[in-house]
Structures are given as structure tokens and as C-alpha cells.
Amino acid sequence: MATPPLISLRRPTEAAIAGFLDRQVESSFNYAEVGASHGDPPPRYAIDRNSVRVGKGQAAFQRAREAINGWAMFDADWVEVHPPGAAVSPGTNVAVLAHVLGIWYLNACRIVYLIDEAGAVETYGFAYGTLPDHAEQGEERFTVLWDHADDSVRYEQFAFSRPSRLLTQLNYPLARTVQKRFARD
């Protein structure tokens, strides 16, 4: 089965995306700092941190957990995750399909770790890292935090990334704009 290119003027078919994902099974991450999004970001990467309050209390926290498990952060009209409803568990491979300026970009990622921590601030989420068939290298973490001190619930997105391909380096301002748009949307 033919796999789609990383960049295309046509939307890849579901079969082509499935083939692209099948090709990722034996791939390793394309960066050395696997898991680093759980702590201090590594040097020589662009850093993105975004946070928004999503509600108060246990019900808001539970809804936000369900949203993360359902990949709701990809509910924008220009970006989606494949396969839809992929299991949020370490080792799961996903393809991120983005449509920007009339061009389709298909990038491969793998879930690195889950976070499910109790305490004064309950935290739930996961991080995925980039595979060789990705235009960039790095990691992105999606978490929801319930601070029991003030009952607030916040969604946070954190990423460190840098170009992994010459084309991405040449178009790095566009890549940074797309990353910021993803965080905003």
C-alpha cells in the first residue's frame, strides 16, 4: 500500500494514513530527550507554554480528563488526529494531519507517557513525541490540573520543538505560527 508524502496538495485517504501509521511501528523517536516534557525543557528547542482556566471542581476536572482522552485539543477545522479515538496509552502511534495554506501536512507521533497524579493539585494528561516521519522533533504535553486550594481547573499545553528537516528550517516562521495557532485554537 502506498503511503502519503509528509506534504501534499491533496488530502491523504484514510487508507494512505493507515499505511503511514503502519510504517511507524518500528520507528524510534527522532530526538534524544524523550520524556523531558515532564520536567525542565531541554536547551536548544523552542518552548511553548499555554494555559487556560476551564472551570471549577470535580465535574470540570472529569470533563477535561474525558476531553483529553477524546483528543478534543484536535477539534479544530484545520487539524486532526488519526486514527480518531486512538487509545491514550504509552506506545500508541498517531498521525497528526494539518491543512495549512492549502497544503496537507502529515506527521507521526507516539505517546511517551501518561500523567495521573493525586494530591493538592490533581494532574491528568499525556505527552507525545515526534517520530522520524515528522517535520519537527520534540515533545508536546497536554494536561489538566485541579488545584484543590482554590478549586480551579486548568488545561495546559507545553511543547519543546525544533525543525527536523531542511524544508521545516526554511519555513520555520510558518512552523512557529502554526504551533501558536494550534495552542490558541
Image (cartoon, rainbow, N blue to C red):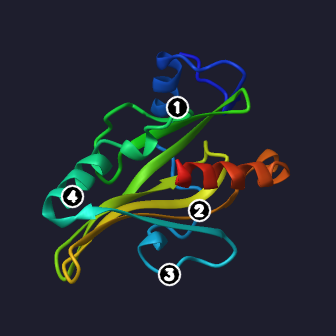
Does dot 4 land on a helix, a strand or a loop?
helix
Residue hosting label 2: 31
Determine which of the numbered discs, if any, sits on residue 40 in the image: 3
For residue 115, side relative to residue 10 (left or right)? left
The mark closer to the camera, 1 or 4, is 4
Residue 7 can be seen in this image = yes
Q: Residue 25 has which mark?
A: none
Q: Position of residue 119 (x, y in %)?
A: 17, 80
Asked if 58 appears above or below 10 in the picture, the reply is: below
Q: Earlier in the sequence, mark 1 or mark 3?
A: 3
Circle number at residue 60: 4
Mark 2 and mark 1: span between their CA atoms? 29 Å
> What amino acid is labelled 4 in the image?
Ala
Closer to the camera in the image, 132 or 146? 146
Kind of residue at disc 3: Asp
Q: Is residue 172 above or below residue 92?
A: below
